[in-house]
Amino acid sequence: MASQWVVLLVCAAIAALVGHLIGRRQQIGITSTLTDMLLAAALVGRIVFVAAWFEHYRDAPWSLLDIRDGGFAPWAGVSTAFAVALWQAWRRAALRGPLLFGLLAGSLAWGVSPALLRLNSGPALSDLEGVAFVNLQGTPQSLAALAQGRPLVVNLWATWCPPCRREMPVLAQAQQQTPAVAFVFVDQGEVAFTVQKFLNASPSVFANVLLDPGKKLGEQLGSTALPTTLFYDANGRLVDTHLGALSPATLAEKLKKLELPG
């Protein structure tokens, strides 16, 4: 999620501050080294992600450069960052102490951030039973009933939201091609007429479109930004979330985490 990138930048700032304090007597700073680490990590992490999911980029090669989908291979990025750190420390002996303590401080901050900010937590599917949804005909619906024991993808969207419009065909295609997963589209704050008009004009076909007139789901999640997508496994446990438009590659990566039956 976007919040994780914010936390990463905060941790980098903490690392830079600690490195500055440790190295100030020798006038050694580690900001430039941290910048090199982050840039190299972002580049390599993106390249590895694209290589792993290239089949989803082949038909639209320009989308390789669209980093808004969040496609990134963390293990490749982290490995690259530490390789850059080792290389810089090998070249400059005076940098080693400030860099070591700075990275330890940044790593500690990253390690405790999920507990402090609850980035990895979220409502289980059972916790959403109190949120009232209706379908386009006005009939009350339950997310658990639509899931029917399957993994579940819940997309929060609205017709006025450009990133939502951009990702809707991707989700519609996945809904058709992945029957082992239940896809539910929960419109935030609009009336049935508006949503139905949008769907009628769309070349894509959608099932399980619900209305959340009071935006209660977004409120319970603590998210006001659209689109937001939740990924639940077959046990109703929140496995992953995504803020912003999904590309075919990022959607495929997240669906893989749901441990679908072979």
Image (spheres, helix red, strand yellow):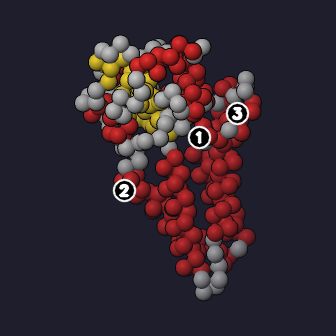
In the image, residue 239 sits, relative to residue 168, either above or below, namely: below
Q: Nearer the viewer, residue 60 or 202?
A: 202
Q: What amino acid is found at the position of numbered circle 3 in the picture?
A: Ser
List x then y, in percent, for residue 150.
38, 19
List x then y, in percent, for residue 41.
65, 52
**Residue at horizontal 55 percent and vertical 24 percent from the top:** 168
- Mark 1 lies on a secondary structure that is loop
Q: Which mark is residue 63?
A: 3
Residue identifier under label 2: 116
**Mark sitting earlier along the chain (3/1):** 3
Q: Which mark is residue 168?
A: none
Q: CA distance from mark 1 to mark 2?
A: 23 Å
Specify whether residue 86 is in view: no
Q: Which mark is residue 70?
A: 1
**Residue 61: quarter of image:** top right
- The residue carrying pointer 2 sits among few (fewer than 14), some (14 to 19) or many (20 or more) residues within 10 Å by Cα, namely few
**Residue 37: quarter of image:** bottom right
